[in-house]
């Protein structure tokens, strides 16, 4: 998490720590994932928390830049978990200046939506949503 916070601070000027409470991912419809290699070394992470009864929010999404495919795998797992928890959509926020993250989410089917909640009225923020299909 400290590596993620440092990377965000370099890119956006804000570590993102203030918008994440670890207690938010301790419920029955939430999770925090850490991707590890075969030796147990952390490669990336991501969290899912409830935003509304039918909407989850992705937080603290990170994969080391040199670890191709790890971010996509974490995001896919979070999406599968969200559908399994009964959510119909996932939302998230990133900063416009974080062009790599913006492109990543768009590439994975997220569409831009009006800024919601604490991000409303903040021009440096960009919010996305992806509708989920039900698990079979």
Image: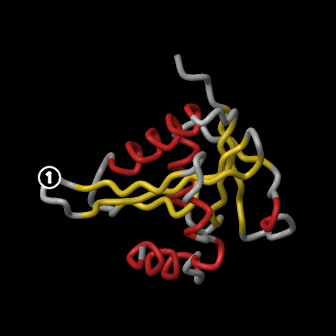
- Few, some or many residues within 10 Å of mark 1 (<14, 14–19, 20+): few
Q: Is residue 29 left or right of residue 122?
A: left
Residue 73: name its quadrant.
top left
Which of the pair 10/27 is nearer the observer? 27
| 49 is higher (above) or lower (below) than 7 | above
Q: Residue at x 84, y 64 (%)?
A: 120
Position of 118 with respect to 129 (left or right) is right
Q: Residue at x 65, y 72 (%)?
A: 19
Residue at horizontal 82 percent and vertical 61 percent from the top:
117
In this view, which residue lies farthest toward the right? 121
Determine the residue located farthest toward the front in the rendered image.
28
The residue under label 1 is 38
Disc 1 element:
loop
Looking at the picture, how far across and down is residue 127, in whole percent?
A: 71, 55
Q: Residue furthest left?
A: 39
Residue 130 point in image, percent of width and height:
65, 38
């Amino acid at each position: 998490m400290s590596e993620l916070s440092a990377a965000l601070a370099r890119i956006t000027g804000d570590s993102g720590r203030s918008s994440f409470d670890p207690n938010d991912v301790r419920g029955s419809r939430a999770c925090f994932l850490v991707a590890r290699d075969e030796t147990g070394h952390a490669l990336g992470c991501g969290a899912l928390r409830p935003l509304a009864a039918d909407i989850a929010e992705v937080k603290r999404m990170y994969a080391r830049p040199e670890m191709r495919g790890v971010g996509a795998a974490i995001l896919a797992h979070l999406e599968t978990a969200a559908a399994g928890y009964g959510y119909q959509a996932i939302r998230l926020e990133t900063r416009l200046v974080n062009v790599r993250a913006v492109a990543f989410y768009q590439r994975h089917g997220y569409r831009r939506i009006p800024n919601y909640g604490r991000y409303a009225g903040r021009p440096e923020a960009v919010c996305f949503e992806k509708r989920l299909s039900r698990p079979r």
